[in-house]
Image (cartoon, grey):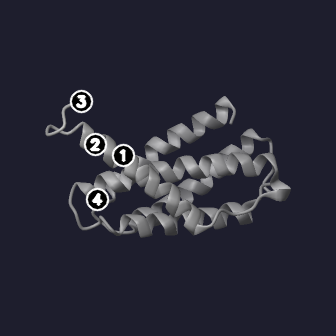
Amino acid sequence: MNDAVKSIVQRNTVASAVIGAVLSPIPLIDEVVLIPFYLLMAKKIAGKHELGPGQVPWKPIALTTFNGLLARAAVNVTVSYIPGVAAAANAASAAALTALLGSYVDDACKEPATAQPIGVKAIVGVLKDKLSAVAARRSTNSPSHPA
């Protein structure tokens, strides 16, 4: 991933985490808000690869985005009823999904003809791993576990 694409992904990762945290009180609304957000990120990344609209592998990107949002909703629904935890989980999963999608779109735009979508199961695994890592960091930095 070149520096220009990395910058796009990093900015979008922060923004999506904010969206996830702010919209966490309303279940699943952030997924709806993130759809155009992710497609715009894909368009920007494709532009950095100098791909015109007809050259971008939109079908696998759209399918991976849909699968990612579905996976994220499935992972988040398990904590959506816990105030505070829901906001942190939504923020973390939005950031993790954005980073995953940014990397995927970058790779897909390098080889548009061979781009294949990522399945829901694979994305669920990545999101669970990221959320587990965040939870572990939070528990080791809590007052009952001084760093």
* Label 1 neighbour load within 10 Å: few <14, some 14-19, many 20+: some
Disc 2 vs disc 3: which is toward the camera? 3
* Amino acid type assigned to the residue bearing label 4 in the image: Ala
Q: Which residue is mark 3?
A: 147
Residue 100 is situated, as x and y percent measured from the top left of the image, at 57, 50
Q: Which mark is residue 86?
A: 4
Separation of residues labelled 1 and 3 (CA atoms): 15 Å
Q: Amino acid at mark 1?
A: Val
Report the Cα–Cα distance between label 2 and label 3: 10 Å
The local crowd at label 3, few if under 14, some if 14 to 19, many if 20 or more residues have their Cα within 10 Å, is few
Q: Which mark is residue 104?
A: none
Work out whether 120 lies above or below 136: below
- Mark nearest the camera among 1 and 3 is 3
Residue drawn at point x = 34 percent, y = 55 percent:
89
Q: Quadrant of residue 63?
A: bottom right
Q: Which quarter of the image is occupied by the C terminus? A: top left
Q: Can you identify the residue that label 2 sits on?
A: 138
- Nearer the observer, disc 4 or disc 3? 3
